[in-house]
Amino acid sequence: MARKRVSRRRFLELAGKGSILAAAASMFPRGVFAAPPSIKGPIKIGYGTVLSGTLAGYGEFHKMGALMAQDEINAKGGIAGQKVELEIRDATMKPDDAIKTARYFVDSWGADFLAGIDSSGQALALGPVMQQLDKVLIVTHAATEKLTEEWVFKKGVRQIFRICNATYHDGNAAAYVAKDLPAMRWATISPKYEYGFTCWKMFQDTLGKLKPGTTFQTESFAPAGTTDFRSHINTILDARPEGLYSTEWGGELITFVKQAAEAGLFEKVKHVLFPVGAAMDVLEGLGKEMPDDVWISGRYYFRYPDNQTNNEWVARFHKRWNHYPAYVSETAYSSLYALKAAVEKAGSKDTKPVIQALEGMELDTPAGRRLFRKEDHQAIYDVPWGKTKADPRYPIKIMGEQKLVPASITFARPPFEGPGTRPPF
Amino acid sequence: MQSIVHVVLAGLSNGMFIWLVASGLTLIFGVLGVLNFAHGSFYMLGAYVSFSLVRALSPHFYLAMLFGPLVVCLAGWAVERWFLRAVYRLELPYQLLLTFAFVLIFDNLVKIVWGAGALHPPPGLGPLEGSVEILGRKFPIYSLFVIAVGPLVALALWALLERTWIGRIVRAAASDREMAAALGVRVPALFTGVFIFGTWLGAVGGALAVPYVGVLTPGMGESIIIEAFIVAVLGGLGSLKGAFLGALVIGVLNAFGTRFFPAFDMALIFLLMAAVLLVRPRGLFGVARS
Amino acid sequence: MSPAAGSRRGARALSWAAAAALVALPLLSGKFATYLGVRVALLAIFGTGYNLLLGRTGLLSFGHGGFYAAGAYALGLCSLHLTAHPLPGLALALAAGAAAALVVGFFCIRASEVYFSMLTLAFGMLIFAVVWNAREITGGDDGLVGVMRAPIALGPLRLDIAGERAFYLLAVALLAGSLWLAHRLRRSPFGLTLAGIRENPVRAEFAGVPVRRYRLAAFVISGAYAGLAGGLEVLLESNARPTMAHWTHSAEPILVSLLGGLHSLLGPAVGSLAFVALREVVQRFTENWMLAFGVVLLVIILGFRGGIVGAVEAGLRARRAGRAAP
């Protein structure tokens, strides 16, 4: 199956050199413009996300964005004149399932590109696999900095790109927000796994340097699946910190916020940062129960940037799905457009030219202008931080006072130790 | 002092949830001799059905909590009548696998009916909303209510089994089903009844969890079932007294562990269970089954 | 030669041919099938060892994921820090699985029935918690990543297993070896004694059989199989992760043993094939694979208690009986 496709492609390459070019091109004119000779057949994109278990809601949000992009692109003539074919598969949250899904897409279904992936463990496990499969994977959710630092930058797995922001935003950028708050003693309740540990460490390192004298006195980590945060909350209340930083996310953040409100935590601790609190499932899930004046952010926020592209997209999204877009909806949607731009720029859907096209590419997306950094393939784009407040126009809390920490500053670790510490490190 | 009281309270309320789920589990095991993996699914179904009823009957949360678990009993009835009955005489692995199949089926059905995304109960559940101040720190009234419900259920169960003729029949069938059958007890019907009752207990746990946990997801039964297993085993399978005590210990210990020995919080309950079983191979109040 | 012996020999030749065809099939049907074939083989090794315990001894362990993880991390750590050569890694994986099983088994073996299951569950989850929390060594929940598949070098001989096909053949060879060993064990006095213990432990005890020691031996052997399978998975996927020790993973060998047939040598292997293939096929048609899979499980338990192998054997027996009758 795979071999057949290659031979067909090689035939066309040969044909392109010869006089059959005109005939071949005129045989397949589709869409707005005819496909360059090396792009033949539909563009097949395999999308792996979590569709079962407690986090399946994230998969549904991925799906909404990806389907919308597919339909819009196809309605306007496809990618380089070719139809987009999207298959979405349950990659669960487990690394072995993610690997199996990737192999299925490439080796069995014949995918040209891959996108999706939710957990950091999955993304890291896919490093060597993507190199072997030699297809481009655009990660739309997993946030571990090790993916782009270790696999892409240090070990040269050029096939992997990340379109969502990473732990830098949750750790470093949060520190930039925290440095302007009148709080010197910080504490955390965060997930008891690498993501939680890494972000808290970045936050401490960066804030400690931005504002010497800041102390980080208490940490209480909650294992995955925690439904009772009361003991964690008591730990924090006992320590009486001035600021609380928490990278809890999804359903666990919702449970935590509800229980923290009941325990009066938000009255005792005035400055609270939720780096992924602006996720749509959290905003919708908490509704008016989200306390006011909490600093939240995410991988995309539906009211930023306030421009035509984004506002129209949000309106279309809301009309079709009756939800405001979650950040994974935006990253899923934009990942398809990034592939479209890259394929059309490269004039090919082969891996190598597409990687070259993506490296350093700038792209206008609903989340604003993205730049795929050449060195580590991390997309650089800005997501604001904001203080929660109620708004009569929305059933959810939105960002009131906003603060923008440019990604160009924070997407390195640590962000201010001179050029040597930024990629290229 | 303030902190310790609050940690104990948190532990108690959490323990009472596990007790509600474990009580049905251990009752079913005690009488039917079946370890029911799908019990966590009944917890989940209890939460989902009650949630839907809250929406429909709003603001009558207590009505929903009463009727929701009854609806789930239908599922329990179907599972026992059509499937479980066929494997009573089989080895443990078959029973576990059969009930495990229902975990998969119910998880997926919930996803189809209610959607894959998490559901969130609306705030405002009548008189139990809000918190009271205990030693200068707020504690939710609803959790106090849960702490009160647990012992009440325990007391009611004890009275039912020890003080009524139904209880006597159930106990007779549990200790020797052949003898009970010979004495004219309709054992299959009795088993169905006990299973439905156990299902109801699990579903009530789920219904009560709706405002407590605040998030409903397909798969929410899977973590509580392991805790309930541990509690039931710790107390001695089939022993309601043991399960109640086990739930209290696990709940409070977990809360203390999280607060004071966070390095061990993932291992604590397993360590405790292993330690107890090594000293008492049949749990705290377990008896050898014939 | 009696006609019965002749037909038995014919049947044996036929089944060898069928096995060879089955082994060759993935190689002929593309990369993904080969990859799935490796996963089937690994699960089959895991299950075959496990069924020496469950099928032969009647002990239901919920902690074998822990031994699988022990093997996986042993190979991963060996490969990353000592040598990437797969042979010492696999030997270490096997030893780690056996050693972990020895320690856990020592504590668990005197418990019986459900309590044995729950104790093994507890120990398995303790291994899970240790692996999850020992971040410096194990990489925490990210796991050990980047284990490479180095060639097997034996003196001048170099066996390159980096390719899918070569690795598939290696996995199948190891599965064949595992099956052969399990076959020998089942037929040995040791295996027969285990079966006797399963049928009636009290009588075995009275007959002077050191029941606990026999059970422990079976437990350790199945742990070694689990360790080997875990090590091989690290070579396949190039990573080891804590969820390998989770009880949900410990449930997999139970599932495939029951699916294929608890009381036959080939049961777990056949069950593994069915398990992987079923999920793969169902997933192509519907997102709701859990529902479909649950229903299939129900059908197996209620309709084919001997598992797939049992059902096939019953079918063959019925045919033979039909032919024998005039």
Image (cartoon, grey):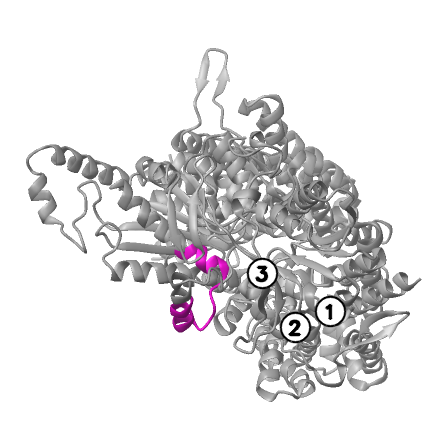
Residue highlighted by disc 2: A289
Q: Residues within 10 Å of mark 3 (few under 14, many from 20)?
A: some
Relative to the observer, which residue lies in front, A122 or A179?
A179
- Which residue is at 77% across, 81% downward? B169
Q: How many marks?
A: 3
Q: CA–CA distance between discs 3 and 2?
A: 20 Å
Q: CA distance from mark 1 to mark 2?
A: 8 Å
Q: Disc 3 marks which residue?
A: A402
Q: Mark 1 sits on what residue?
A: A261
Q: Which residues are magenta?
A: A314-333
Does A149 appear above or below B278?
above
Q: Are marks 1 and 2 in contact (CB under 8 Å)?
A: yes
Q: CA distance from mark 1 to mark 3?
A: 23 Å
Q: Which mark is residue C239?
A: none
Location of residue A208 in the rendering, given as x and y in whole percent from the top left corner: 72, 42
Task: Please say whether residue A329 is one of the residues in the magenta stretch.
Answer: yes
Crowd tier of the residue under label 1, counting other residues whose Cα lies within 10 Å: few below 14, some 14–19, many 20 or above: some
Circle nearer the viewer, 1 or 3? 3
